[in-house]
């Protein structure tokens, strides 16, 4: 079977829910952004692994949002998506890159309370490496899709602060403005040519480098939104029709000015996510001994794997949300 999602057996029901109010996707980058990251990352892979990922392009794309959906099932999933770096004094000097050392210094409960995305990215990379070693198709696809999601989260500045939605600075809704509204309006103009995947020799350092870049961008993220709001030259909100529902959104004029002042920040973070995702996949394959993947092409998914996907979708559509709310 070439592509699992091309068969009716593997297409799961999709429920779309719209609400009246300020449009702000509760999910990092929005579903569109996460799917775009994973899909584009496939085309940066070298020829040794490109055919495998190309065969499963639809799965890698559609399941980029599974980590968010797991919030409806797994209580411990939420902290895997962020880290409150402003909780720590001198975070880039004081926080150990090693999970065991970090636990010793801060305790596991404290770490999870303030987010564990850097360590979870590294753990997921190790899981993907093991899946490659075992030539386990289902696990390769699961961990590849997950990695793209968590890497994307690490590239979002608002995933590095306890003020993740401007709730402490009278800027509630900024999360959705930055990662969903601007992507919705301007992603068609992004340059998605990011070059080929590279081998990452020090994975933990690279993860923390990304988080530092994200965190240092926070000042501009908050400052420009506050300036535009204070200047009051543009209507901040407007109403748009989404199917049969009218929703309140950040106005196009306000969004355009914010986009202009950010000077392509959102595009840079999204395309950097694409490049790093491809590079982490490639690195996991290399570290697994560069197994020949041609022998696992045309692999049919197991019934248990299908049931797992169906259960995840069912829980997601029940909307039992847990974790941070970015409305």
Image: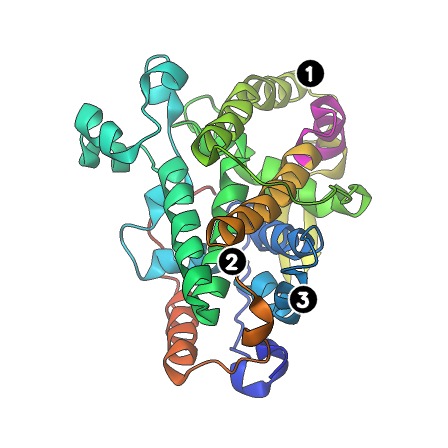
143 and 134: which is toward the camera: 134
Question: Of helix, strand and loop, which one carries label 1?
Answer: helix
Image location of residue 139, percent across then percent down: 43, 65
The numbered disc on residue 231 is: 1
Whether residue 92 sits left or right of residue 194 in the image: it is: left
* Residue assigned mark 3: 51
The numbered disc on residue 145 is: 2
Alpha carbon of mark 3 to alpha carbon of mark 2: how far?
16 Å
Front of the two marks 2 and 1: 2
Whether residue 195 sits left or right of residue 126 in the image: it is: right
- Quadrant including the N terminus: bottom right
Front of the two marks 3 and 2: 3
Q: Earlier in the sequence, mark 1 or mark 3?
A: 3
Question: Of helix, strand and loop, which one carries label 2?
Answer: helix
Whether residue 239 sits left or right of residue 96 in the image: it is: right
- State the extent of the magenta-drawn residues as a range: 255-266
Identified at 44% across, 69% down, the residue is 136
The secondary structure that most of the magenta stretch takes on is: helix
Front of the two marks 1 and 3: 3
Q: Is residue 236 magenta?
A: no
35 and 316: which is toward the camera: 35
* CB-based contact (under 8 Å), mark 1 and mark 3: no
Image location of residue 24, percent across then percent down: 55, 45
């Amino acid at each position: 079977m070439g592509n699992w999602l091309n068969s009716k057996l593997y297409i799961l029901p999709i429920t779309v829910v719209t609400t009246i109010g300020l449009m702000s996707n509760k999910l990092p980058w929005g579903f569109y952004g996460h799917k775009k990251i994973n899909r584009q990352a496939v085309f940066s892979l070298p020829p040794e692994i490109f055919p495998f990922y190309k065969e499963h392009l639809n799965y890698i794309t559609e399941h980029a949002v599974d980590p968010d959906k797991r919030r409806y099932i797994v209580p411990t999933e939420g902290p895997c998506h962020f880290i409150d770096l402003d909780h720590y004094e001198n975070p880039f000097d004081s926080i150990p890159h090693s999970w065991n050392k970090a636990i010793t210094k801060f305790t596991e409960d404290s770490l999870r309370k303030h987010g564990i995305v850097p360590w979870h990215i590294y753990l997921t990379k190790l899981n993907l490496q093991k899946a490659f070693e075992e030539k386990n198709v289902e696990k390769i696809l699961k961990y590849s899709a997950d990695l793209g999601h968590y890497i994307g989260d690490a590239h979002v500045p608002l995933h590095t602060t306890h003020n993740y939605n401007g709730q402490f600075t009278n800027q509630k809704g900024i999360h959705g403005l930055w990662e969903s509204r601007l992507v919705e309006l301007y992603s068609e103009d992004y340059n998605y040519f990011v070059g080929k995947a590279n081998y990452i020799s020090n994975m933990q350092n690279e993860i923390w480098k990304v988080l530092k870049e994200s965190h240092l961008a926070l000042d501009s993220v908050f400052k420009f939104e506050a300036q535009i709001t204070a200047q009051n030259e543009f209507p901040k909100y407007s109403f748009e029709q989404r199917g049969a529902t009218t929703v309140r959104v950040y106005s196009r004029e306000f969004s355009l000015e914010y986009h202009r002042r950010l000077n392509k920040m959102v595009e840079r973070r999204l395309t950097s996510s694409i490049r790093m995702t491809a590079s982490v996949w490639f690195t996991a394959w290399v570290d697994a001994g560069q197994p020949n993947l041609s022998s696992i092409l045309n692999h049919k998914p197991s019934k248990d794997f299908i049931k797992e996907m169906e259960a995840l979708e069912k829980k997601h559509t029940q909307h039992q949300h847990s974790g941070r709310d970015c409305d």
